[in-house]
Image (spheres, helix red, strand yellow):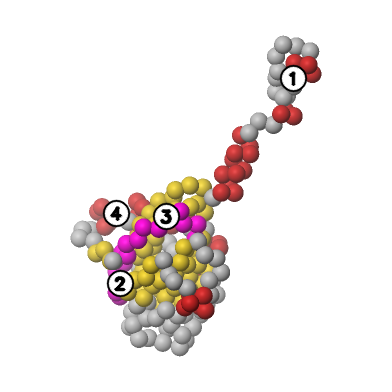
Amino acid sequence: MACLHDHDCADHNCSSDWSLFKHIDLPKVSALNEAVTGSVKSVFKPWEQRLNSSEGHLESNEGDPELIVFIPFTADVKIKSIAIVGGADGTSPSKMRAFVNRDGIDFSDAQSMQAIQEWDLAENLQGVLEYQTRFQSVGNITLHFPDNFGADTTRIQYIGLKGEATQMKRDVVANIVYEIMPNPSDHKTRAETGGGFSHVE
């Protein structure tokens, strides 16, 4: 289901408030079948810059419109909606499929696995369409774009994810818990000190 805003988002600031951009682990974002290696990172940007193409775009290899985009997060998140701004002249993706918390998905996997959700996309050159979802406890999401609107390549200028962070990564939490747990070796007992009180060195 797509949501078309009925007001001026610049006035309401409706998307930037809930943007998950700051929670994306950008150095670990990757794509399969991208014409320029690493170009996928350029499509993740603040919502206000969604139409800014000066930093590049993601494009598939010539004659093969299929793309897979892997997006890990620095915290577990809840995803409420996804926005895709594609290219003109038939290069926008026409379909999107999502897989949650599945690492290393390739094209063979994507074609054989059941997606958690699928959407038929519209050409969204101004970034006003959002596709609703309710994904919980997401550590990473893989987006599969199997086709476009008839061009030889698929082009994506912006991928926007809206939602909220729900908790820190488990390894970060474990480190914090470890640090606040008292270490018995750091404390002297009454027998060791000869006094009536223990103290921390």
Q: Residues within 10 Å of mark 2 (few under 14, many from 20)?
A: some
Q: Residues within 10 Å of mark 3 (few under 14, many from 20)?
A: some
Label 4 close to label 3 by CB (< 8 Å): no
First in residue order: circle 3 vs circle 2 = 2
What's the residue at 70%, 18% (across, down)? 198
The numbered dot on residue 189 is 1
- Give the residue at mark 2: 124
Q: Amino acid at mark 2?
A: Asn
Q: Amino acid at mark 1?
A: Thr
The numbered dot on residue 15 is none
Q: Judge whether residue 3 can be spotted in this image.
A: yes
First in residue order: circle 2 vs circle 1 = 2
The residues colored magenta run: 121-140
Q: Amino acid at mark 3?
A: Gln
Q: Main secondary structure of the magenta part?
A: strand
The numbered dot on residue 136 is 3
Q: Secondary structure at mark 2?
A: loop
What's the residue at 29%, 53% (across, down)? 13
What's the residue at 34%, 71% (across, down)? 119
Q: From the viewer's perspective, is residue 18 above or below residue 105?
A: above
Residue 138 place in picture, x, y as percent:
46, 57
Q: Secondary structure at mark 4?
A: loop
First in residue order: circle 4 vs circle 3 = 4
- Closer to the eye: label 2 or 1: 1
Q: CA distance from mark 3 to mark 2?
A: 26 Å
Label 3 close to label 2 by CB (< 8 Å): no
Q: Judge whether residue 29 can be spotted in this image.
A: no
- Give the residue at mark 4: 14
